[in-house]
Image (tube, rainbow, N blue to C red):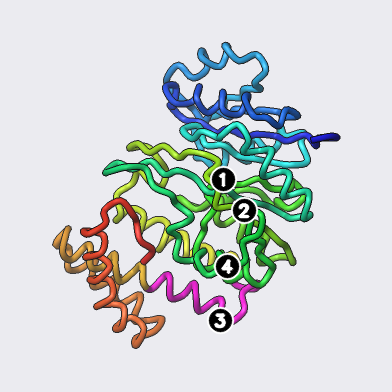
């Protein structure tokens, strides 16, 4: 690719000395060569600082522990590239990840692109993630040359309902990042960043169903390493509530309804968890009252649904379903 633009790769890490080298080497070994690699150590107490010395081409910065969003934002402050890619320190890019993504980004003058991946599982074999994403399936018929273009209205609808693009899957123009990763989010700091862009200005994106990277899973993953009840509490209740407050003036009435219903669904399912699993009747009732205060008929309708979804998770424990 002639006249390659500089791409800054931000790798936030925390106590990942065993997996970090694989992530770094997958970045170094990209077929797209005009890259700046910035590793942000978010307060590791293992041998991360020592192992980085093996990679003189890497920029390394240590900070006090503040979470993944603060680490990514610090990395952004050191970025020299006009294109940004954030690689989680436990993930691995295929050698052509950047080349394929940047080619599409530039060819169509998009704000960002994202790629499918092989999802490691704690139970069973790895699985193809995006091909099983119910929110993306309606867009599959638009696929051309292995890519699906998403126009502005499609992006608004999709990202209010779901986030099909974890950080390691995304290549984004720096000019499209408005304020960075949201440090107030418990889990979905990247989701909030995409929403800020999408709700603030007309933008376009694309995704490919080609698996161009691998997501590894262990007990300290921000999302995949958590219990489902924690994902509910943080991502689908606390973070959704924060998004409603943050984007209140940018949401259309029907879009606010989508977030309100996501919030209520989370409350009802978490109430079920606390009632059945924790035997905490008082807290469960408090959660239900919060949901009833927003919409009584919707809340009543969610009660049988959350029991059915609980059954689905027993049948297919690999997948964490949206509430």
The kind of secondary structure element at disc 3 is helix
Determine the secondary structure under disc 4.
Answer: helix
Circle nearer the N terminus (2, 3)? 2
Residue 89 image position (x, y, % from top left): 50, 32
Residue at mark 4 to residue at mark 3: CA–CA distance: 26 Å
| Residue at the image point whose x is 74% and y is 55% from the top | 110
Lateral position of residue 163 relative to residue 29, left or right: left
Q: Residues within 10 Å of mark 4 (few under 14, many from 20)?
A: few
In front of the other: 73 or 115: 115
Image coordinates of residue 293 in percent, x first then y, are 37, 81
**Residues at marks 1 and 3, CA–CA distance in whole angstroms:** 29 Å
Q: Residues within 10 Å of mark 1 (few under 14, many from 20)?
A: many
Circle 3 crowding by C-alpha within 10 Å: few under 14, some 14–19, many from 20: few
Does the segment drawn in magenta span residue 128? no
Q: Of the residues tagged 1 and 2, which is closer to the observer?
A: 2
Q: Which residues are magenta?
A: 248-264
Per the rendering, the mark at residue 146 is 2
The answer to the question of whether label 4 and label 1 lie on touching residues, with beta carbons closer than 8 A, is: no
Of residue 207 and residue 91, the one placed in the foreground of this image is 207
Q: Residue at x 79, y 54 (%)?
A: 109
Rendered location of residue 43, percent (x, y): 49, 28
The residue at which mark 3 appears reads as 254
Q: Of the residues tagged 4 and 3, which is closer to the observer?
A: 4
- Per the rendering, the mark at residue 169 is 1
Mark sitting earlier along the chain (2/4): 4
Which one is closest to the eye, mark 2 or mark 3? 2
Give the Cα distance between marks 1 and 2. Answer: 15 Å
In the image, 241 versus 308, the foreground residue is: 308
Q: Which mark is residue 141?
A: 4
Left or right: 251, with 81 as reference point: left
């Amino acid at each position: 690719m002639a006249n390659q633009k500089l791409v800054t790769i931000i790798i936030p890490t925390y106590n990942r000395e065993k997996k970090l080298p694989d992530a770094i080497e997958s970045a170094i070994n990209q077929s797209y060569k005009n890259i700046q690699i910035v590793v942000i150590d978010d307060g590791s107490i293992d041998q991360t600082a020592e192992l980085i010395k093996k990679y003189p081409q890497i920029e390394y910065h240590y900070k006090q522990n503040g979470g993944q969003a603060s680490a990514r934002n610090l990395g952004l402050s050191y970025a020299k590239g006009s294109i940004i890619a954030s690689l989680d320190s436990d993930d691995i890019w295929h050698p052509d990840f950047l080349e394929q993504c940047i080619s599409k980004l530039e060819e169509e003058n998009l704000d960002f692109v994202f790629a499918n991946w092989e999802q490691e599982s704690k139970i069973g074999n790895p699985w193809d993630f995006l091909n099983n994403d119910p929110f993306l399936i309606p867009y599959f018929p638009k696929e051309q040359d292995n890519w699906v273009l998403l126009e502005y209205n499609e992006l608004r609808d999709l990202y209010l309902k779901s986030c099909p693009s974890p950080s390691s899957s995304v290549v984004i123009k720096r000019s499209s990042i408005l304020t960075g990763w949201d440090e107030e989010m418990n889990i979905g700091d990247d989701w909030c960043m995409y929403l800020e862009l999408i709700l603030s200005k007309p933008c376009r994106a694309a995704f490919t169903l080609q698996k161009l990277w691998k997501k590894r899973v262990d007990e300290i993953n921000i999302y995949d390493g958590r219990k489902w009840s924690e994902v509910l509490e943080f991502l689908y209740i606390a973070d959704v509530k924060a998004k409603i407050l943050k984007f209140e003036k940018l949401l259309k009435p029907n879009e606010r309804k989508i977030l309100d219903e996501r919030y209520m669904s989370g409350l009802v399912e978490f109430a079920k968890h606390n009632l059945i699993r924790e035997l905490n009747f008082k807290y469960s009732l408090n959660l239900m009252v919060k949901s009833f205060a927003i919409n009584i008929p919707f809340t009543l309708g969610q009660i049988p649904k959350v029991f059915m979804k609980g059954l689905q998770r027993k049948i297919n424990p690999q997948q964490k379903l949206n509430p």
